[in-house]
């Protein structure tokens, strides 16, 4: 009832307008959009980092590689998104540009958190200025530089570092299972199996292993490997 009253009074018409209870309704709508997106799980492992994402594309006419959910930002950094993927594409392109500029200027790869902060700053701007809407996407960014790192940025521009996390549809159920299953001594290959089993338990009969895209960056190579769920 309170949300309906806010809408009638127009508090949801701009991302720059606070409702009387302190909420920014456009930002909250964008967060709901993220929870409608295809889900992904990220794992920090003892030998690298893993992203496992549901492609959700079932049509046999679609070429699978054109809908791959794992995006490369740099050799040592990968990303997956939930929400409006066209919004995510713009942010990923900006992250790639930042990483390449850093390499040209400093002759060294960009730190993962520097890339995350750059993207988060852009997201924050779109919650504060008129004439725009928030980016309707959450990004999970992972990689290996001095350490193995996994970050998630939300629609507000906040970001946190995680040992394991989930974004997208059914994220609360997935995170509940992650808290039960996560073990810092897992290898990358073992983490993929754990993630697929979590999806299977949450999806039940709807689970299809072939629908999952997997990204792995190992400590020893610092290079992205892209695989399919059917490989495990």
Image (spheres, grey):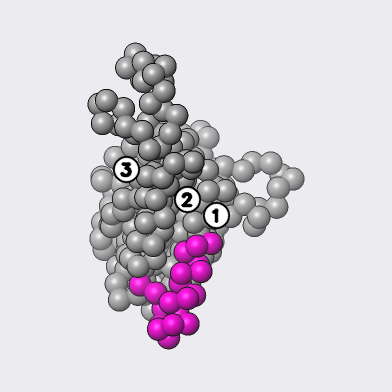
Label 1 Cα neighbours within 10 Å, binned few <14 / some 14-19 / many ≥20: some
Q: Which residue is mark 2?
A: 81
Counting residues from the start of the chain, the first of labels 2 and 1 encountered is: 2
- Residue 103 visible here: yes
- Whole-Å distance between the Cαs marked 1 and 3? 25 Å
Q: Is residue 78 above or below residue 181?
A: below
Residue in front for this viewpoint, 143 or 56: 143
Q: Residues within 10 Å of mark 3 (few under 14, many from 20)?
A: some
Q: Which residue is mark 1?
A: 89
Mark 2 and mark 3: Cα distance apart in space: 16 Å
Instruction: Give the label, 2 or 3, closer to the camera.
Output: 2
Mark 2: secondary structure? strand
| Quarter of the figure with the N terminus | top left
Question: Is 94 contained in the magenta span?
Answer: yes
Magenta-drawn stretch contains 123: no
Q: Please tell me in which quadrant of the rendered image residue 44 appears.
A: bottom left
Task: State which tag comes first along the sequence, 1 or 3.
Answer: 1
Q: Is residue 110 left or right of residue 104?
A: left
Q: Which residues are magenta?
A: 93-111
Badge 3 is on which residue? 175
**Which circle, 2 or 1, is nearer the viewer?**
1
**Numbered label attached to residue 207:** none
Answer above or below: position of 119 versus 207: below
Q: Of the residues under marks 2 and 3, which one precedes in the sequence? A: 2
Q: Is residue 48 visible?
A: no
Q: Report x, y in % for residue 156.
A: 35, 45
Who's the residue at 62% across and 43% down the image?
Answer: 57
Q: Nearer the viewer, residue 19 or 144?
A: 19
SS at badge 3: helix
């Amino acid at each position: 009832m309170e949300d309906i009253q806010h809408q009638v009074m127009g508090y949801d018409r701009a991302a720059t307008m606070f409702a009387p209870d302190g909420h920014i309704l456009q930002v909250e709508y964008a967060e709901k959009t993220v929870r409608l997106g295809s889900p992904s799980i990220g794992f920090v492992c003892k030998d690298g980092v893993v992203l496992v994402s549901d492609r959700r594309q079932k049509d046999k006419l679609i070429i699978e590689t054109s809908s791959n959910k794992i995006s490369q930002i740099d050799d040592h950094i990968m990303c997956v998104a939930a929400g409006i993927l066209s919004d995510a594409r713009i942010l990923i392109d900006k992250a790639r540009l930042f990483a390449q500029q850093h390499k040209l200027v400093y002759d060294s790869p960009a730190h993962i958190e520097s890339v995350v902060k750059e993207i988060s700053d852009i997201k924050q701007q779109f919650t504060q200025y008129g004439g725009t809407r928030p980016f309707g996407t959450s990004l999970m960014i992972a990689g290996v530089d001095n350490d193995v790192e996994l970050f998630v940025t939300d629609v507000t521009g906040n970001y946190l570092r995680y040992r394991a996390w989930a974004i997208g549809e059914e994220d609360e159920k997935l995170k509940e299972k992650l808290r039960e299953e996560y073990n810092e001594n897992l290898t990358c290959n073992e983490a993929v199996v754990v993630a697929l089993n979590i999806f299977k338990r949450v999806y039940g009969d709807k689970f299809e292993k072939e629908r999952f895209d997997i990204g792995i960056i190992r400590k020893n190579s610092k290079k992205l490997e892209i695989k399919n769920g059917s490989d495990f």
